Amino acid sequence: MKHVLLSIAFLLTASFCNARTERVTIQGDHGKLVADLQTPDVMPKHCPIVILCHGFTSNRNGGLERGIAQELEARGIASIRFDFNGHGESEGDFQQMTVPNEIEDALHVYNWVKADSRFGNIGIAGHSQGGVVTAMLAGQLGKKVLKGGVVLLAPAGVLRDDAIRGLVAGQPNTQGDPLDPPEYVEVWGHRLGRDYITTAFWLPIYETAAGYKGPACIIHGTADRTVPYTYGLRFHQLWKGSEWHLLDRYDHGFGPHPEEAVKLAVTFFTKQLKR
């Protein structure tokens, strides 16, 4: 969903600028994906790693993704954050982007990480629409593959309901009949394609996510008007034994203190990946 600008100094510290970050490209579903691979100064053998998935219209340099990467690196955990097709510096046309092809992008990144002998156990986190991608990919891959666990930050399970109601990103629009949408609709200065709407209408979000049985952490805010917290709560109810953190008066980007969401995510991954 819509990226919320995070004006917080802790994400822009000198320590982040000095981190070991390597720019890599990975073949995705609709062209090459640009990614930042961040590793600790001293790499342990089979270093644990977390894949970070940004939200709708955002990119890999969002505040939450950068903040989590920085804090993981300080704890000896690597991360890779990437731009989905049609976003940021990655190839592809935003109008052709759909949740299913973003899942394919994330799977390509997972396979790239898995093939690199430097890395061991893998975790994955996603914010907003990236949270839906993360949950569905986790359901496809299962517990034995994602030993590092899953973190969902304000996961946008609402997107299927929005499509059914004739909305896009929670806002009324001029798409007309949701069963027969136009070639594209304008959303936040972007042309969102017909395929996005038609696939979202039938998207088996929770049904697919149910295939994951491993450790998970879901973080949401009560002041989230883009994705009501009940959509995050449903993931918690679906994934028995998962952690559930409901932050009072926090919005979709976890303002006013996004570092709190970062801390919860990093604490969870540290526990899962450093055992």
Image (tube, helix red, strand yellow):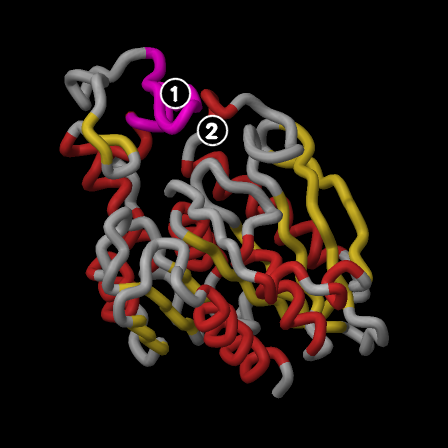
**Left/right of residue 76 with respect to residue 209 in the rendered view:** right
Figure check: 238 above or below 136: below
Badge 1 or badge 2: first in the primary sequence: 2
Residue 82 in picture, x, y percent from top left: 63, 46
Magenta stretch in the rendered image = 183-197
- How crowded pointer 1 is (Cα within 10 Å; few <14, some 14-19, many 20+) is rated as many
Looking at the picture, which amino acid does disc 2 mark? Met
Q: Is residue 245 above or below residue 3?
A: below
Real-space Cα separation, disc 1 to disc 2, in angstroms: 7 Å
The answer to whether mark 1 and mark 2 are in CB contact below 8 A is yes
Q: What residue do we see at 29% from left, 76% from top?
A: 240
118 falls in the magenta region: no
Q: Is residue 168 above or below residue 229?
A: above
Label 2 element class: loop
Q: Which residue in the structure is indicated by mark 2?
A: 97
> Few, some or many C-alpha atoms within 10 Å of disc 2 (few <14, some 14-19, many ≥20)?
many
Percent of width and height locating residue 213: 39, 70
Question: In this figure, which residue is indicated by the disc labeled 1?
Answer: 193
Q: Could you say where residue 133 lies in the image, as x and y percent from the top left? A: 44, 48
Q: Outermost residue, right direction?
A: 42
In the rendered image, the quadrant that contains the C terminus is bottom right
Is 256 or 28 nearer to us in this picture? Answer: 256
